Image (cartoon, rainbow, N blue to C red):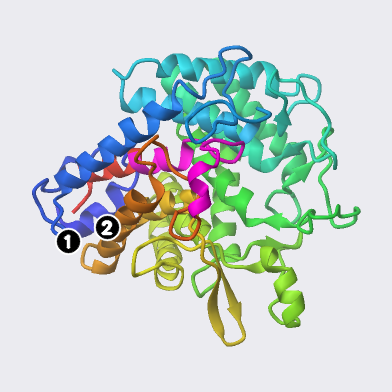
Amino acid sequence: MTTTACKFLYLLPILLLWAGCTPDPEEKTDQGMTNEQLRQELTFALNEQLLDKWYPAIIDKEQGGYLSDLDYKWEPNGPQNKSIVTQARHLWVTSKVAMFYPDKPGYRAYADQGYAFLRDKMWDHEMDGFFYTVDRSGEWKSGENDADKWAYGNAFAIFGLAAYYKLTGSEEALDLAKKTFMWLEKYSHDPVNQGYYPFLNREGKAFGRDLPVPAGQPQLGYKDQNPTIHLLEAFAELYPVWEDSLLRARFEETLVTIRDTITRPEGYMNLYFTPDWKEVSYKDSSAESREKHYNIDHVSFGHDIETGFLLLEAAELLGENWYNETLPVAKKLVDHSLEKGFDHEIGGVYEQGYYFPEGMKIVDERKNWWAQAEGFHSLLLFSTIFPEEKSYREGMLLEWDYIKKYLIDQTYGGWYSFGTDHSPETITRNKANVWKSAYHDGRSLMYSLKLLETGGH
């Protein structure tokens, strides 16, 4: 089978195996590493350096679900409040590992425990929808600004529940995923302008720009790139097990919104939009105003390079025509990140860039762990789609070298929150918190291993 013929077929390596695309394990990379050597390193990094550190350390044996806060030595250290995002991500990881490594002990039980906590403690049994956060025992307390339910969090609930259903066949779990989707449809989805409102109160009222904006949350009321891409991800996990017509419509709508509205022609995504999808930007403001609002309209290279993969994952599920129309946009997102937001000396995807009148500049040189995980996997993916374009392979190998040197804790295991080249203080910071789980790095390594088995060149 030719490389061109493989391009469409192998994109979902976890779901589809195409023997005709199997790489030569002894084929050497441009830097002398064979695919088999890379596979061995990724296998060690996934198991000994990641999964075996997170689990069972993160399992909450007293209150159920998963702990949230572990120090750099993997000991409990913090309030242990539980976010639906983190809990659902651990549910997804444990479910996927149980399927990826059927003989690896414990993961089915870890997934069972996570599912029970979502079902019993995080779902609002009076008004439906998942609470964004509860305390360790699962008790909900109204948030300071009453944004008690997030589309982002409910998206990850769907994501985790669908994966758990694939592992267990639990119709109860699938029904809960369906109910979550319908709750989003009723309260979060915008039937006029499309898309989803990100923040809602307990009753399901979405925060709009007509409400007072709390201090420190200038984005409240805008539509947001980040929950949109993860809703796409959630729909991609759910659709193969529930081919519902409404879900299909929202799946298509969300992909088109990201591809044709959120993504700019230059190859990066805008962050925030008004409810009718007008870009929120301070680029034409004064220097003082621009600097004050960097968090509203900067370039997030990690989200961009991650979305290159998420768009293709979704497009392949929707069909070949969707894939063909989406591939050029996904490629632009990866290309722009590699060209403008990547450290070509030692590797690493930068945290933030900004388009000033005179051009792009990096405004935050830190290198977040999740962006490196997504960057590595996307670069490997695109090196298999476009093996003739050597920049993907070269970038992927440099990124992996960076991850080994600056992100993986060679003493205690796991990944630091930021690369130590710019953030040496991260060495003694918590390995786990409500925003950091085993999801980004775990998915990257599992999916990359599958790529090397089925489609790496």
Residue 95 located left or right of residue 149:
left
Mark 2 or mark 1, earlier in chain: 1
Residue depicted at x 60% and y 45%: 250
Quarter holding the C terminus is: bottom left
Label 1, on which residue?
31
Q: Residues within 10 Å of mark 2 (few under 14, many from 20)?
A: many
- Mark 2–mark 1 CB contact (< 8 Å): yes
> Toward the viewer: 224 or 11?
224
Q: How many marks?
A: 2
Residue 39 appears in the rendering = yes
The residue at 48%/23% (across/down) is 57
Give the quadrant of residue 99.
top left
Q: Is residue 428 magenta?
A: yes
Q: Nearer the viewer, residue 435 or 178?
A: 435
Q: Could you tell me the amino acid type at mark 1?
A: Gln
302 versus 103 height, above or below:
below
Where is mark 2, residue-wise? 397
The residue at the far bottom in this view is 358
Report x, y in % for residue 286: 76, 82
Rendered location of residue 304, percent (x, y): 50, 60
Amino acid found under the numbered disc labelled 2: Leu
Instruction: Please name the residue shown 51% across and 15% down the image.
Output: 112
User: Which corner quadrant of the image does residue 297 belong to?
Assistant: bottom right
Q: Which residues are magenta?
A: 424-445
Instruction: Look at the picture and state if 373 lies above or below 99.
Output: below
Q: Is residue 360 left or right of residue 277?
A: left
Q: Secondary structure at mark 1?
A: loop
Residue 8 in the magenta stretch? The answer is: no
Query: Would residue 170 appear left or right of 324 to someone viewing this image?
Result: right
Pinpoint residue 310: horizontal percent, then vertical percent.
46, 50
